[in-house]
Amino acid sequence: MRIVFIGPPGAGKGTQAERIIEKYRIAHLSTGDMLRAARDAKTPVGVEAETYMAAGELVPDAIIIAIIAERLEQPDCQYGYLLDGFPRTLPQAEALDAMLAAKGTALDVVLELNVPEEELFQRLAGRGRADDQPDVIRQRLVAYREQTEPLLQYYRQQGLLKSVDGIGTVEEIFHRVEAVLDPYAC
Ligand code: ADP
């Protein structure tokens, strides 16, 4: 099963992603986690990415596309994966399509976790990560609205988009997620 998981910062994607990979036994490819690991290890990519992340801006497409291209070659990806935080821009989505086409594979489904913006700010402000300062949160929400939301239309046109309401308990939301994903599980 190859899934793209889309949702604004603070939507609860990380929590649901953990449940998804456990139930469906697929690899978890979180670009946020990969970038934070690179930053903490002070690799050249990590050092460059840090300035963008700290400002709530997206890391340049070329960097992130190279990271994903390499990651998709790892053996665990052959059994399927959950892409969490990628793609986040139209060029990233197009690059992903090209990578998949080159492998003769395709996405099964694009899952959107839908949470209204008013709710997101509250949740993020209570979390306490380094990029959870109010002005950085605002910038991440702007980046989502301007650069990532257009992907919903892109995937809707491909007939891949399924949206799930992200308001409720973790359990309630996971039931909605399962209802969408179960038909694709083998
Ligand atoms: P959130 O969804 O809570 O904003 P993530 O953990 O997914 O957080 O990402 C944290 C930061 O890492 C983003 O604000 C951005 O700077 C960078 N990042 C992660 N994924 C991408 C991506 N696909 N393209 C560009 N930048 C990214």
Image: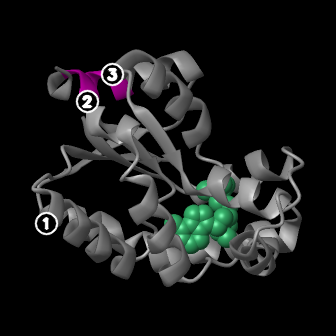
For the residues bearing labels 1 and 2, Cβ distance under 8 angstroms: no
Q: Residue at x 20, y 60 (%)?
A: 100
Give the percent coordinates (x, y) of residue 103: 16, 58
Residue at label 3? 178
Vertical order, 137 against 7 (above or below): below
Give the percent coordinates (x, y) of residue 113: 44, 44
Q: Which mark is first along the chain, 1 or 3? A: 1
Residue 69 relative to residue 129: left or right: left
State the residue in front, 67 or 143: 67
Q: Which residues make up the magenta segment?
A: 177-182
**Amino acid type assigned to the residue bearing label 1 in the image:** Gln
Residue at label 1? 157
Say which quadrant the C terminus sits in: top left
Disc 3 from disc 1: Cα separation = 23 Å
Residue at label 2? 180
For the residues bearing labels 3 and 2, Cβ distance under 8 angstroms: yes
Q: Quadrant of residue 48?
A: bottom right
**Amino acid type assigned to the residue bearing label 3 in the image:** Glu
